[in-house]
């Protein structure tokens, strides 16, 4: 079986970056939620710091663990697919040819051309061609779970620092406004990055993220005021 190559593909790096963007956004929203709940209930900076810091650490490690488990499951599934296809190839000498050709036949290629392409691909890279034809999976480009985990860990911690520092460094009368502004800026950045990575409209992603951030702030502030 082919193992993961040492040099990461662009897709692998983008997947790690996506995990980082999502982790950062979660870090921002969870930390600001705890901060506003706590700050609405007390003006004690030490209590606010402990609550915010504890949530930042919990969120970061939770995101990392979640990404590691999710990507590991994906990686093992991909490897199982490759192993299964190798067994089928070994059991039927015509399996590869029929599998690859059927993919091209489904795309409207003539039978003669489809089998000619299959024969050519089998000579060069049989298992790779079979797996890609059936699953559009590129062997050796498994997503690295550690990359996704560390990306989420550090980005969630970094994202959570925006509202945490704003809440702690500004004087009492400016705490809430400064934290709202810091949160708005941070989620706008993660929204634009996620849109660029997903090749979608940046403006819509930014507006959506900002609205979600402000709703998060409002809900947690109201909860804090209850106590």
Image (cartoon, grey):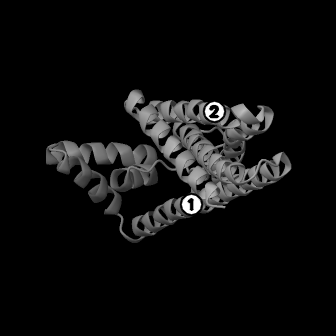
Q: Hey, which quadrant is residue 8 in on the image?
A: top right
Q: Nearer the viewer, mark 1 or mark 2?
A: 2
Residue 82 coordinates in the image, percent (x, y): 48, 61
Residue 221 coordinates in the image, percent (x, y): 60, 50
Question: Which label's residue is closer to the chain start, 1 or 2?
Answer: 1
User: Quick one: which residue is furthest to the right in this view?
Assistant: 46
Q: Are marks 1 and 2 in contact (CB under 8 Å)?
A: no
Q: Residue at x 50, y 35 (%)?
A: 191
Give the SS element for disc 1.
helix
Q: Which residue lies under the disc numbered 1?
A: 70
Q: Residue at x 37, y 55 (%)?
A: 135
Residue 153 coordinates in the image, percent (x, y): 70, 48
Q: Quadrant of the C terminus?
A: bottom right
Residue 128 coordinates in the image, percent (x, y): 45, 50
Cα distance between the residues tagged 1 and 2: 37 Å
Taking the image as drawn, is residue 141 in sight? no
Q: Hey, which quadrant is residue 54 in on the image?
A: bottom right
In the foreground, 81 or 224: 224
Q: Residue at x 68, y 54 (%)?
A: 59
Give the SS element for disc 2.
helix
Please state if 102 lies on the left or on the right of 128 as rendered: left
Residue 177 is tagged as: 2
Residue density around tag 2, few if under 14, some if 14–19, many if 20 or more, within 10 Å: some
Residue density around tag 1, few if under 14, some if 14–19, many if 20 or more, within 10 Å: some
User: Quick one: which residue is furthest to the bottom in this view?
Assistant: 91
Does 82 appear above or below 138?
below
Taking the image as drawn, is residue 201 in sight? yes
In the foreground, 37 or 51: 37
């Amino acid at each position: 079986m082919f193992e993961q190559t040492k040099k990461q593909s662009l897709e692998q790096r983008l997947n790690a970056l996506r995990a980082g963007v999502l982790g950062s956004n979660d870090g921002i929203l969870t930390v600001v939620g705890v901060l506003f709940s706590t700050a609405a209930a007390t003006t004690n900076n030490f209590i606010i710091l402990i609550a915010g810091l504890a949530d930042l650490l919990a969120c970061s490690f939770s995101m990392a663990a979640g990404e590691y488990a999710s990507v590991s499951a994906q990686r093992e599934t991909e490897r199982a697919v490759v192993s299964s296809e190798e067994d089928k190839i070994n059991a039927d000498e015509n399996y590869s040819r029929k599998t690859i050709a059927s993919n091209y036949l489904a795309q409207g290629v003539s039978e003669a051309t489809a089998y000619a392409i299959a024969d050519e691909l089998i000579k060069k890279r049989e298992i790779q061609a079979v797996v890609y034809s059936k699953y559009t999976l590129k062997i050796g480009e498994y997503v690295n779970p550690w990359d996704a985990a560390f990306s989420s860990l550090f980005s969630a911690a970094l994202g959570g620092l925006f509202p945490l520092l704003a809440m702690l460094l500004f004087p009492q009368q400016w705490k809430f406004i400064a934290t709202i502004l810091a949160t708005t800026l941070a989620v706008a950045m993660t929204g634009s990055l996620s849109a660029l990575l997903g090749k979608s409209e940046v403006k819509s992603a930014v507006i959506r993220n900002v609205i979600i951030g402000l709703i998060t702030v409002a809900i947690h502030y109201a909860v804090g005021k209850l106590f």
